[in-house]
Image (cartoon, coloured by chain):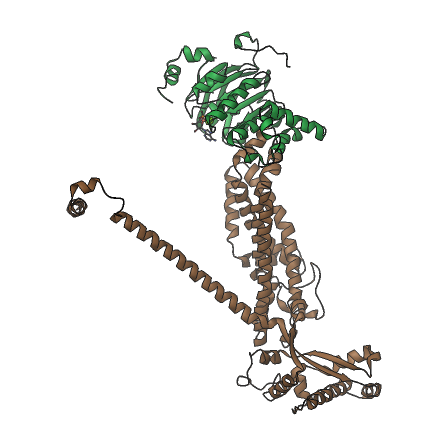
Amino acid sequence: MNEMPHIDKAAEMTDSKISAKQVQVFYGDIHAIKDVDIEINPRSVTSFIGPSGCGKSTFLRCLNRMNDTIDVCRVEGTILIDSEDIYDPKVDPVQLRAKVGMVFQKPNPFPKSIYDNIAYGPRIHGLAANKTAMDEIVTSSLQRAGLWEEVKDRLSEPGTGLSGGQQQRLCIARAIAVNPEVILMDEPCSALDPIATAKVEELIDELRENFTIVIVTHSMQQAARVSQRTAFFHLGILVEEGPTQDIFTNPTDKRTQDYITGRFG
Amino acid sequence: MSDTTLPPVASSADTTPSEKRKTSLYRTDALTRKRNAAEARFKAYGITAIVIGLFFLVVLASSIILEGIPAFTRTIVQVEFTITEDQFEAAEQELFKTRAYEGFFIASLEEQLRQKGIDAPFDSDAIERLVGKTGGTIREFFRENQDLLGQPVAFELAASSRVDGYMNGRITRESIVDSRFLMKSDLYIVDALVEAGVIRNAFNWNFITGADSGVDNPGGAGIGASVVGSFFMMLVVLFLSLPIGVAASIYLEEFAPQNRITDLIEVNISNLAAVPSIVFGILGLAVFIQFMHLPQSAPLVGGLVLTLMTLPTIIISTRAALKAVPPSIRDAALGVGASKMQAVFHHVLPLAMPGILTGTIIGLAQALGETAPLLLIGMVGFVARGYPEGLIEGFTDPNSAMPAQIYTWAARADFAFYEKAWGGIIVLLVFLLAMNILAIVLRRRFERRW
Ligand SMILES: Nc1ncnc2c1ncn2[C@@H]1O[C@H](COP(=O)(O)OP(=O)(O)O)[C@@H](O)[C@H]1O
Ligand SMILES: [Mg+2]
């Protein structure tokens, strides 16, 4: 797992981690996502950009079936993760979400201790046989999220007492703790200050070695900094998708061009 | 129209054109003054409202306490006397045995007064009116404790409620009307007894622990039996309505799909909360007693009826508490792969707990004070009269409940029961206060566990 070669460009990849075909999402009568086809590479960062309301979050939430919790939401098309259709009736969304973790826009630690925040996931999935194993998971998750040094002396204090940036890294650590393969992040830095943002971005860059990361962002600079591939959404349509470099320097579509030059959005 | 009114306003504002552009902050303008005045007026209204509210609260509380406190005391006549073995033997030979004992009592009472230099004429009828039929009590005592014959024994006899009334000023020499309960002349005896120091006030434990008495014995009436009845009813209500209510709310709030049927259920639950309680009473009468043949007047049935009444309250407050838990917590739990049920039970429910508990206790408190449905299922005071001794136990024994008991007393003709009703209200309020304090304590406890 650790001797994975550092992947810079998706071109080297043969098969994708996530593959979406003709995905449609409806909120009641609203057609929020239209005909989206996308391949997402393993162990890399893919960012979704686009003006707000264009369906980035909606599409992201399809990838771990968080949309199932919205009554009016209906998803059509196929989404394969490791060549398995996650919308297959045989698939239990709960099991899927252990494999595809999520970090939300607003840091949302549980109103419990820092330790319990991390330990909750492993506990319900039975990942730790005993207290020592759990301690080990908590420690390593916090270390991988770069939060260990800051919180190691106050693991029993409430997670809600941390600063915003720390809370968001705690949420990332919480997601890591259940050992997912994919981590979805929905504008993880939009509630953070620039320094906290930089830390999270750094963290995302490190996590890429072990996880497939999909990040929604409305900051084009952030997409440029952290992602290898970028997808541009507009009005529920995936307008353009490609290596981040190309999207920003050489967009093929007029709408992408207008967006990245700041003409709308 | 506006053209005609505009010029004067404008002209007054820009009498000096330069001042219009550069108004001083030191001078409050007309609009600000108006706003400030409105705010001050509003504050005054608010304070007035609170003062009026407090005034009524004080009036209510003080009148309850003033009227109710006498119910907690009773007048006791304390007489010490000795009966020798010969006297005992002789009395047992008599035809009217209790008469003989009463004679001893009166004799020693007279003796006690004479020693203190007080002379009051009384006969056995007067004594009966004051302390009831004493002979039976005394005979009973000596037959059971024959070893005490020949020794001085102090008897404490409860005076009748009329004497209570005279002692605490409810009955005055002017207001009294001669009756078989109390004659005007008896009051001289009472005065003499007071002077001799054989009458005193004591705490009326019987009021706290006893059952209701007959309509002609207000002095012996106690609220204890109905406290027990209320307690059993509350147990039924708590153990039925809390689990059912919370389960229903969790299902409706977290799991049920949003459709016509759940909308209909929601509307109906809200409406049920507003249904008059007497409707639940008649429903209980029809369903639990007439159809299911559960015992009449039983706390079990009362509890079931009150459960029906409390459920909407608990469901509404539980749903509000669940709604108040931020959705981000649910997302967080689902995001790490918790099932919906795990998310609800591990995260949402603990956060909603203070609200749920508060709602439950408020619902219980409402149920505790509810009278109307209990009247319909026969939980009125008189049922306890079959049990003059001690308390009524169990879910199925006929019993009363506190508010129904208070209602019964208040409805009785004898004015002495009026005082009991006030006393009962004090007991009821003490329980309600305790429940509210419990609600606050529990809420604090659970909230601290963030
Ligand atoms: N829960 C919902 N119910 C109904 N419509 C929704 C819901 N969530 C999002 N939408 C609609 O779907 C569209 C896409 O929203 P979203 O995915 O949140 O956009 P983005 O994340 O790109 O800003 C918007 O038009 C929004 O109004
Ligand atoms: Mg969004």
Can you see residue A224?
Answer: yes
Q: Quadrant of the C terminus of chain B?
A: top right
Compared with B145, B307 (above or below) is above
| Image hue for chain B | brown
* Residue B34 placement (x, y as % from top left): 28, 51
- Residue pictured at 57% horizontal, 60% vertical: B369
Q: Nearer the viewer, residue B184 or B408?
A: B184
Could you say which quadrant of the image residue B321 lies in?
top right
Q: Using the image as rendered, state which of residue A63 and residue A224 is in the foreground.
A: A224
- In the rendered structure, the colour chosen for chain A is green
Nearest the viewer among B86 and B414 is: B86
Check the image and report above or below for B239 versus A74: below
State the image coordinates of residue B431 (x, y, percent, origin top left).
60, 60
Residue B195 image position (x, y, % from top left): 63, 85
Residue B46 occupies quadrant: bottom left
Identify the residue shown where x is 50% and y is 50%: B271
Q: Nearer the viewer, residue A85 or B278?
A: A85
Image point (61%, 80%), residue name:
B162
Say if residue A65 shows up in the picture: no
Which quadrant of the picture is home to ligand 1?
A: top left
Q: Is residue B240 above or below residue A158?
A: below
